[in-house]
Amino acid sequence: MKIFRLAIATLWLMSAVVYGADESFDDLMGGFDEEVSVVLEVPQQVPALQSRYQLSGAYTFSSSFNYAHDAPMAGNTDYRGLSRAKNKLDLQLDIRINEHWKARIEGRAFYDLAYQINGRSDYSDDVLDSYESEAEIVEAWVQGSVSEKLDFKLGRQIIVWGKSDNIRITDIINPLDSREPGMTDIEDLRLPVFTSRFDYYPGGAWNLSALIVHESRIPKEAAQGSDFLPLNVFPFPEGFIFPEDETPEQNLDNTQYGLALNGVFQGWDLSLYAADVLDSRWHFEESNSVRRYGRVQMLGAAVNFTAGSWLFKTELAALNGLQYNTTQNKKSRWDFLIGTEYMGFKETSISLEIANRHINDYEVQMINPADFVNKNELQTALRVTRSFNHDTIDVTWLISLFGSGGDDGGFQRLWANYDISDGLMASVGVVDYIGGDNPVMEALSDNDRLFAEVKYSF
C-alpha cells in the first residue's frame, strides 16, 4: 500500500504540473476510504559559518619582448628580444581575530626564466639580483578598533595620500618599486612600510589620521647596467664609479611621521597633510662614494569635487629639505597639480593631469649630472579607458610627458585587459619610451617593448 500511495503522490505531483494541483489530486484519490496525508519536508538552510581564516592569491605569468634596441657594443649586455618570462605567486592570508580586529599577511615570490633562456653569464650580478628572482613579505598588519572613535593599524602597510592617479604630489609615505618605470601604474608600485596608524573619527564628515613610520625603506631602483639604468649613456666624467645606495639604519632617530585631516562632504572632499619622511630621491655624500636618502618635510592639500560627469582634482605640496648633488644648499620646492576626469561617454573614461614642480632658489648647475633638474618641471598625463563586451575587455592608453610639449621625454602605453572567466585574466600591450632633452628619459628611449600577461586568481 505504501508503494501505491507513493505512486499516487507521484502522479499527483506530475499532474499538478500539467492541470493544477487541487483538481488532479481529488480525481486520483476518489474511491479510497483511508485518508492520505502528504508531508513535504523542506530542508532547513543552515547558515554558513564564516571561516576565521581566508587564503587567497594569484599566479601570474608575464612576458615582454624588446624590439627597439640596436645591437650592443662588444662587452655590453644584449637587451634585444626576450626581456621577461616571469612566474609570480602572490599569497594572502586574512584572519578574523574577533568582531573588531583582523589581520593580514601577504607574501610574494617570482622567478624570471628569461635570464636562464638568454644566458645568465650575459648579465651583471646587480641585474640578476634585482630582476631574476625575489621573495618577500608585502603587507603584514593587524587592525582593529580601540574604541568607538579610534582605530589602530600596526604593521607593514600602504598609505595612499592625494587624489591623483598618475602623478605623485602628496603621495609620499610609501616608496616605489621603480625597477621598470613606465610598465606599471603607481597603485601597483607602492612598497609597504612598517607603520603605526591611528584613525580618529570624532563624528561628522572629518577624520584625523596619524602615522608613525618605523621602517626606513628606500625605493627599489633599476639595477646599474640594466636597460632601465644604462650608466654608459649618461654624461658622467670618465672614470666615474656610480656608488651603491645606502639604506638608513632602523632606529628611533630615523622614525618618520605623518598627519592627515580628511573631510568628506556632499560632492567634494578635502585632505590636509603634514609629513616628515624619507626623501624618495638619493644624493651623493662622502666625495661621491655613497648615495644616501635624506629627510624631507611636506605640508600639502588635496581636493576632489564632482560636477555632473566631471571629476576635478587638485593637489598642492610645499616641500622643504631637498638635497641635490650639484649644490650644498638644501632646497624647497612647490609641487602643484590640476586634473580632471570625464565619464560622460558610455563605457569610456578620460582623465588629464598636469603638474609642475618649482624649485626655489634654483642654481644653474643643477641641470648638470647627476641632478638633471630644471627650475620648473612640467609633467602631463593623459589616460583614456574604454570597456567592451559587457565590461569584460578594457582598453587603456596612457601617455606621460615631461617638459613643455614633451621636450624632456616620457612614455606611452597601450594595453588591453580581458576577463576570460572568474579569476582568469589576460593582458597584452605595448610600451613606447619617448626620448628628449632629459638624459634619463633619453637613455630609456630604446626600451620599447611588447608585453603579455596571464593571471589566475584564487
Image (cartoon, grey):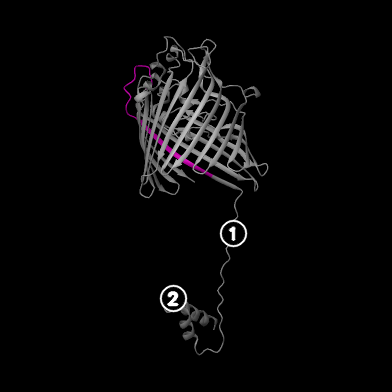
Badge 1 marks a residue whose secondary structure is loop
Determine if residue 212 is in view. Answer: yes
Residue type highlighted by circle 1? Pro
- Magenta residues span 56-77
Determine if residue 225 is in view. Answer: no
Q: Nearer the viewer, residue 395 or 134?
A: 395
Badge 2 marks a residue whose secondary structure is helix
Measuring from the top left, give residue 270's x and y in whole percent.
53, 36
Measuring from the top left, give residue 124's x and y in whole percent.
44, 21
- Residue wearing tag 1: 47
Quadrant for residue 337, please give it.
top left
Crowd tier of the residue under label 2, counting other residues whose Cα lies within 10 Å: few below 14, some 14–19, many 20 or above: few
Q: Nearer the viewer, residue 359 or 81?
A: 359
Magenta stretch: residue 187 in it? Answer: no
Q: Sequence order check: which comes first, mark 2 or mark 1?
A: 2
- Residue wearing tag 2: 17
Residue at 50% x, 86% y: name it.
Answer: 29
Residue type highlighted by circle 2? Val
